[in-house]
Amino acid sequence: MDLKSLIRTIPDYPHEGIMFRDITTLFGDARGFRRTVDELVQPYAGYKIDAVAGIEARGFILGGAVAHQLSVSFIPIRKKGKLPWRTIGADYELEYGTDRVEIHEDAIAPRARILLVDDLIATGGTTAAGIELLRRTGAEVVGCSFVIELPDLNGATVLDKLGVPFHALVQFEGT
Ligand code: AMP
C-alpha cells in the first residue's frame, strides 16, 4: 500500500514557501490508517516499552493508537498552558520566536522506557524538546516514530546527536 499517495500536500500553508503535509487524508482512509499504525509499531514489537509519548496534536492520534497496540500507557506532551496539574516544560525555537512543550510532573514512572511518536520530523526541534523533557524525569527514550520525514531539514542529525534512533514511514523532499 502506498501511504505517501494518501498524504495531501497543501502549498503555501500556513505561510508562503511551506509545503504542508496533511495527514488527515491518511487518517480518513481506514486501511491506510491501520497500515500506518502497524508500521509505526512494527520495529518495537518484542521491545520492552513502558509507555508511548505523543506530541500535541497529531502525535496524540497516532501515539494513542500505537500505545493501544503495544498494550502500554500513553503520555500526552502538550503545548504550553494546556495541562491542568503541575507541569515541567522545555522551550524550543520556532522560525519566529519560541514555544514550549509540557508534561505533568508525575506522568512518568522512574526509568520508564518510552517510545516518542509524532506525525512529522522537519528540523527536529519539537522532537528534541520532547526528548529533553522526558529525560529530565529520568525516563529513557528508546526511539522515535514518525509518519513523515523531511530529510532536507536535517532532523536526523539532531536525533543522532541526542543518541535516539528513529524511523519514518515516508520521506518528502524540500521544506
Ligand atoms: P520540527 O520541530 O521542525 O521538526 O517540526 C515538526 C513539527 O512541526 C511537527 O509537529 C509537525 O506537525 C509540524 N510540521 C513542520 N513542518 C511541517 C510540514 N511541512 N507539514 C506539516 N507539518 C509540519
Image (tube, rainbow, N blue to C red):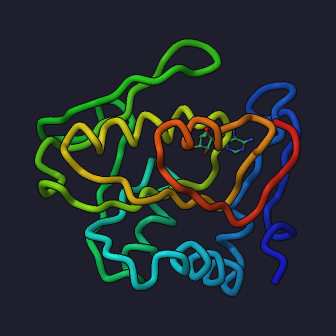
Between 95 and 49, the one nearer to me in the picture: 49
Q: Furthest-top residue in view?
A: 97
Query: Where's the C terminus, which quadrant?
Result: top right
Q: Which of 81 and 36 is in front in this view?
A: 36
Query: Residue shown at 61%/78% (left/top)?
Result: 39
Q: In the figure, 13 relative to 170: above or below?
A: above
Q: Where is residue 45 in the image (x, y as percent from the top left)?
A: 45, 83
Vertical placement of residue 74 versus 31, above or below: above
Q: Could you tell me which residue is drawn at 82 percent across and 67 percent down?
A: 4
The answer to whether residue 23 is left or right of residue 41 is right
Give the quadrant of ligand 1.
Answer: top right
Q: Tell me which corner region of the image, top left, top right, bottom left or bottom right, holds residue 33.
A: bottom right
Snapshot quadrant of residue 135: top left
Which residue occupies the foreground of this view, 8 or 154?
154
Q: In the rendered view, would you say 78 is above or below 24?
A: above
Percent position (x, y) of residue 43? 54, 76
Task: Identify the residue at image location x=69%, y=87%.
Answer: 31
Quick check: 42 left or right of 15? left
Tell me if residue 164 comes above or below residue 69 in the rendering: above
